[in-house]
Image (spheres, rainbow, N blue to C red):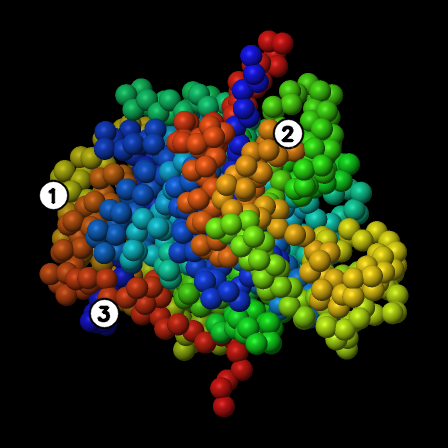
Amino acid sequence: MSSTDSHLHLAAALDGTGWHPASWREPVSRPRELFTAGYWADLVAEAERGLLDFVTIEDGLGPQSTHRFEPDDRTDQVRGRLDAVLIASRVAPLTRHIGLVPTVVATHTEPFHISKAIATLDYVSTGRAGLRVQISARPDEAAHFGRRTVPRIDTWDSPAAQETLTELFDEAADYVEVVRRLWDSWEDDAEIRDVATGRFIDRDKLHYIDFHGRFFSVKGPSITPRPPQGQPPVTALAHGTVPYRLLARQADIGYVTPHDAAQARAIVDGIRAEQQAAGRADEPLHVFADLVVFLDDSQARAEARRDRLDTLAGQPYTSDARIVTGTAAQLADVIEELAAEGITGFRLRPAVAGHDLPRIGRDLVPELRRRGRFRDTYEASTLRGLLGLARPANRYAKAVA
Amino acid sequence: MSTPLKQIHLAAHFPGVNNTTVWSDPAAGSHIEFSSFVHFARTAERAKFDFLFLAEGLRLREQGGKIYDLDVVGRPDTFTVLAALAAVTDRLGLTGTINSTFNEPYEVARQFASLDHLSGGRSAWNVVTSWDAFTGENFRRGGFLPQEERYSRAKEFLATANELLDSWHGDEIVADQATGTFLKDARAGAFVHRGKHFDIHGRFNVPRSPQGRPVIFQAGDSDEGREFAAAGADAIFSRHATLREGQAFYKDVKSRLAAYGRRPDQLLILPAATFVLGDTDAEAEEIAREVRRKQVSGATALKHLEFVWNRDLSAYDPDGPLPDVDPVVGDDHIAKGRAQVRMYRDPVAVAREWRQLAEANNWSIRDLVINTGNRQTFVGSPETVARTINEFVQADAADGFILVPHITPGGLDPFADKVVPLLQERGVFRADYEGTTLRDHLGLAHPDEARTERAAS
């Protein structure tokens, strides 16, 4: 059984105890276990029980902060996190179907290392790896590496800020290009184990990627053979034209933040236009809407819970993404409304992981299924398969005559 | 009163990308699929081994300008495999080789701290260095280090990583849901490091892990490498696997510890060792000879001769005599990405010696490479191998061994099934794990206890 066109895709965005800064104070949260494997294994198992397409795992190369571009000194919120790629790898053998999409910061890491890490995640999960690429514009994170400086951004809309972000996103596009070329740097049948000639590989099927860009150069080939999916899906969160261009050039999934149907349509049109400009109009590119969710049996109960958390936090919760506070049916309505504008999937950010993630799987998913919009069973064994993406040909393989 | 017997430490090295690994054997499986790693790790844990060991190489080897194709080629990412193995094992230590030249301290410290959390305190880091521009071509930081700076950078890299790991003390997270205090110290993770190779400051973002720091391995054999190990490593992955060389190395390295205020038992000497088992010693010898011939095909023999000759020898017959031309002496070597070519400091003299050896024994090129190459460390019946390993350890040639099977992934199974029970019977190897962390298995103090000890003395 394959997914039908009316089916939507669902992902859960995992971040600590949840996206509300006071989420760790809920009795259902386990803040003292945040740095254990068991905590993460339980969350991902919960998402898999709901038949979600995948989970993303947030990460960063500095402490979490309420400021966008610098650390704060707060002691009343969760601070500290584990490497997302390693969390994903740690839970991979404990799961069977769900995709695992860790966050990677392109600005300060080596594309060679990340390419083989995600390829290896694809091996340990037998085809369920993905990658969420992010930039870092925080000067303090740059100082953790000491290899470059990032100019301080004060106003988001200033020309200087736009120039900095454009550079960082252009660099991220090159980074993904290198990661992808390295995945293809071994053809699928490069390992021949030919006892007669003593050759383990056919070296004509290994390729130097010879990438030379404005920001760096990488020779290749990878040390890791082509991963099971060929190209694990690449994903990114985007809030404007500059990052839409990254999606259009390099991504399989873009996460966007429409607050209503009109915005959703405008964003989808904007991304499709960039795709056209990048010459990738015919390539599949999912556009997922990010939604923060507070889910309860009634809207009043969800609102009361949100109010209680806001009181604990000392201020109302705000987000770049639309916040849906209500019942699973109400969330399903929002989802269908946005889907009508060309959104093909949803990355849900549970306000409280221990509460809202189970609600997604146990309430929202059955509701969407009743409406004919979600799968009854995992219909594919790889993440690309779940997303309806074919296994791509290798860019370096010669076409068979 | 007799001295109590030393307890042996045993580790399992996943078969690597050298010709030690016999990929042509019908029993040889994938070196990439996770199922191979699971099999290997579970065998090691079933046998109560201290840890599993993964090597690393960051560029595929080349010879004569082409990717070397006669050995196993390719491997998965070290950290990612170890994190996944933490899910399918419970006690086994997880040791990864990670290069200090093509990484940055903040990221490596995060990865080891994360691995240590996710494995419940089972992580270890084999710190290696490179300097070559060849490998550097795969990295955005590019370039390379002057050879004399590689240990200076490695030392500062390790010291910086330790500062980051120590920037959390372990008591900062209170996570009091009632009062709303998550951290008791707003400056948790604060660090400043100003040095020649690293000038960094800010906040480390992974809280203190169960072992505090990963167990540190060092693998170099030079004088600088030994000093580096004496100063800060917990264990040495050495290459001296004969009794006499082992004892000399052991004595030399352990004697360097006092200068750093450390006791001999704070640095373990764990040589790499290969093995071949048979029902009898004679049968094992016969199998070992066959294995060596499989490890060195005619084509492999010519390539190994090129390591010394540093010129294209493909026109020579591996079953014929050695070349009468002399090696090409120079830095630009025909074999790229191999540490071993540096062992031949005077290739012309080595070539002369090998020609004499071959003539005296009537050896072909292939015979010579087989006979001058490393013989397996332990060859014999299970009884012989168990006795020999124990003798080496009790005679201070080693504190244990890192075993490198020649078959992936099942090559460790006979050792686990036949030799380990004999060592257990002799009372020199654990019958079960006593602790949960790798430091527990190796008898190493937690870094916080070590610090308290030093302060008190």
Q: Nearer the viewer, residue B259 or A337?
A: B259
* Tag 1: amino acid: Asp
Q: Position of residue A57 (x, y in %)?
A: 38, 47
Q: Chain of mark 3?
A: A
Give the camera-side residue of A5 and B323: B323
Q: Earlier in the sequence, mark 3 or mark 1?
A: 3
- Going by the numbered disc 3, the residue's amino acid type is Ser
Type of amino acid under label 2: Ala
| Residue A194 on image: x %, y % | 54, 74
Does any portion of residue A251 appear in the rendered image? no
Residue B395 bears which disc, if any? Answer: 2
Say which residue label 1 marks.
Answer: A297
The reply to the same-chain question for discs 3 and 2 is: no
The residue singled out by tag 3 in the image is A3
Q: Is residue A279 left or right of residue A206?
A: left
- Vertical arrangement, residue A16 with respect to residue A52, above or below: above
> Residue visible at 60% across and 29% down?
B394
